[in-house]
């Protein structure tokens, strides 16, 4: 199924021509922003110098810290009276990034969400529960307007009051749900404790945090849904930048709206399809806040194979972020790697926390893991066996010794939004 088949399947010379046309428009739009006028001059490049798509490598990167320094409206390319909505990031690493939207920006955004929804077989007649934060966070309103555009019956439940969320799923016959994967597992856990089966659910849209194939299997088994990965970031409107199709093998990024590069995060060198690196995006249709070569920090790769669904080139599942990568005794570790190991073990429950400490000048990683009730007999030898097995599996995957502490089911924090599973207590790291 297609929402906009012409744009979803465009490729070859037609796509290149469209991208170049939109790139040139975007570059001229950036010249309404002081930062880009100054940055282009420093780089010795003018918008008219970009005559081919490959010329984009001549342009400077844009970093999140640049956007933070432009707080609040320094990156807007239109007068404030043309900005009909503002969203911001959380600002947990400094000043929040402020993102503005014109009416056309909102139309573009909802169009991409509509493509994603229809692509996985959801449409009129489906009841959609949007269990993410509404407000300055882009996830809630982003999906909301796209779902309404398609014609879904939308329940703006937001987060929290999980028992009420479960009641709404049952009472309203919800067929599709959107939330973070960690909150979806929490919903499943609470539903099981209530003796509810959530039989009406058939489709789950999950994003805003990295998650693994192991978690996909867990979500599909526990909730009875087909689980699809959603990727987006506020700087590119919000959710909707890329999404899985029914093949569930990589995410289609909308190349008519985004020019995509994969680079080595250390050198900035462009990588080829099949090589994993940092995702860099130049949006091609943003009016209020055009960006050039934005360093997302997300680690992925362009996939080489053409998808059986007929849509454009995909990116692989996000494996982590270059800026949340943990360096433990010289070894690079992503929290998603830890999650993948834990979710594959029947002895482990759904929740875990990672603590990083520096002990006598050495980094130590401690992982608290909830036990699975079904796998624990109550015998101390079982507890020791479980700890040894989990630590061994983590060592095999990470190449790093870890301390594993098993805790009772239900004792670790639950998260309604993005899960914050890593506490780095080393100081200055």
Image: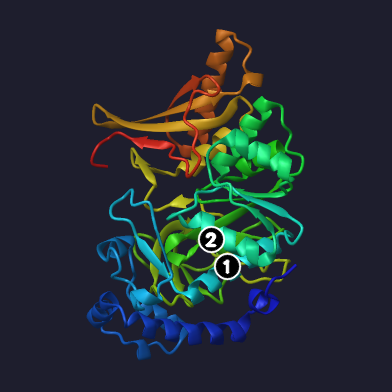
Q: Secondary structure at mark 2?
A: helix
Q: Quadrant of the C terminus?
A: top left
Corner quadrant of residue 314: bottom right
Q: Quadrant of residue 270?
A: bottom left
Label 1 packing within 10 angstroms: few (<14), some (14-19), many (20+): many
> Which residue is under mark 1?
110
x then y, percent, for residue 322: 39, 53
Mark 2 Cα within 10 Å, few/some/many (few <14, many 20+)? many
Residue 40 appears in view:
yes
In the image, 279 versus 160, the foreground residue is: 160
On screen, residue 211 versus residue 219, left or right, reads left
On the rendered structure, is 72 left or right of 219? left
Q: Nearer the viewer, residue 125 or 425?
A: 125
Q: Are marks 1 and 2 in contact (CB under 8 Å)?
A: yes
Question: Where does the image place residue 145, in percent across and percent down from the top left?
Answer: 58, 63
- Find numbered disc 1 in the image and state the secondary structure of the residue it sits on: helix
- Image height of 360 relative to 227, above or below: above
At 27% from the left and 81% from the top, the residue drawn is 37
Number of residue marks:
2
Looking at the image, residue 387 lies above or below residue 277: above
Front-lying residue, 36 or 356: 36
Badge 2 is on which residue?
A: 142
The residue under the point 62% across, 45% down is 213
Q: Residue at 64%, 79% (x, y): give it.
A: 10
| Residue 427: % across, % down | 24, 37
- The x, y position of residue 84, in whole percent, is 43, 70
Q: Is residue 224 visible?
A: no
Image height check: is 152 above or below 422?
Answer: below
Q: What residue is rendered at 71% in x and 27% in y?
A: 195
């Amino acid at each position: 199924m297609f929402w906009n088949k012409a744009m979803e399947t465009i490729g070859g010379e037609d796509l290149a021509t469209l991208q170049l046309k939109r790139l040139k428009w975007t570059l001229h739009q950036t010249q309404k922003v002081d930062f880009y006028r100054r940055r282009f001059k420093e780089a010795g490049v003018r918008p008219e110098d970009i005559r081919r798509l490959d010329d984009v490598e001549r342009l400077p990167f844009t970093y999140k810290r640049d956007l933070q320094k432009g707080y609040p409206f320094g990156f807007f390319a239109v007068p404030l009276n043309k900005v009909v909505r503002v969203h911001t990031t959380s600002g947990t690493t400094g000043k929040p990034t402020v993102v503005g939207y014109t009416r056309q920006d909102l139309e573009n955004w909802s169009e991409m969400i509509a493509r994603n929804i229809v692509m996985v077989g959801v449409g009129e007649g489906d009841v959609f529960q949007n269990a993410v934060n509404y407000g300055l966070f882009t996830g809630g309103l982003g999906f909301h307007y796209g779902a309404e555009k398609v014609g879904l019956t939308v329940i703006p439940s937001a987060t929290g009051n999980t028992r009420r969320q479960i009641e709404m799923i049952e009472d309203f016959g919800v067929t599709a749900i959107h939330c973070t994967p960690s909150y979806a597992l929490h919903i499943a856990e609470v539903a099981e404790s209530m003796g509810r089966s959530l039989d009406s659910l058939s489709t789950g849209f999950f994003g805003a945090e990295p998650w693994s194939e192991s978690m996909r299997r867990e979500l599909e088994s526990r909730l009875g849904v087909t689980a699809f990965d959603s990727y987006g970031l506020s700087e590119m409107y919000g959710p909707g930048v890329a999404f899985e199709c029914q093949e569930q093998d990589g995410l289609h990024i909308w190349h008519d709206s985004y020019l995509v590069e994969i680079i080595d995060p250390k050198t900035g060198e462009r990588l080829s399809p099949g090589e994993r690196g940092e995702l860099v995006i130049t949006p091609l249709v943003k009016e209020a806040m055009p960006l050039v070569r934005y360093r997302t920090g997300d680690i992925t790769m362009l996939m080489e194979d053409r998808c059986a669904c007929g849509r454009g080139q995909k990116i692989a599942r996000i494996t982590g972020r270059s800026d949340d990568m943990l360096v433990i005794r010289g070894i690079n570790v992503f929290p998603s790697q830890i999650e993948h190991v834990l979710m594959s073990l029947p002895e482990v429950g759904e929740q875990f926390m990672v603590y990083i400490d520096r002990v006598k000048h050495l980094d130590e990683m401690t992982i608290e893991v909830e036990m699975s009730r079904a796998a624990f007999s109550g015998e101390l030898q079982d507890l020791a066996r479980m700890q040894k097995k989990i630590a061994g599996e983590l060592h095999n995957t990470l190449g790093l010794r870890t301390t594993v502490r098993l805790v009772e089911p239900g004792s670790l924090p639950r998260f309604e939004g993005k899960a914050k599973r890593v506490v780095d207590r080393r100081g200055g790291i």
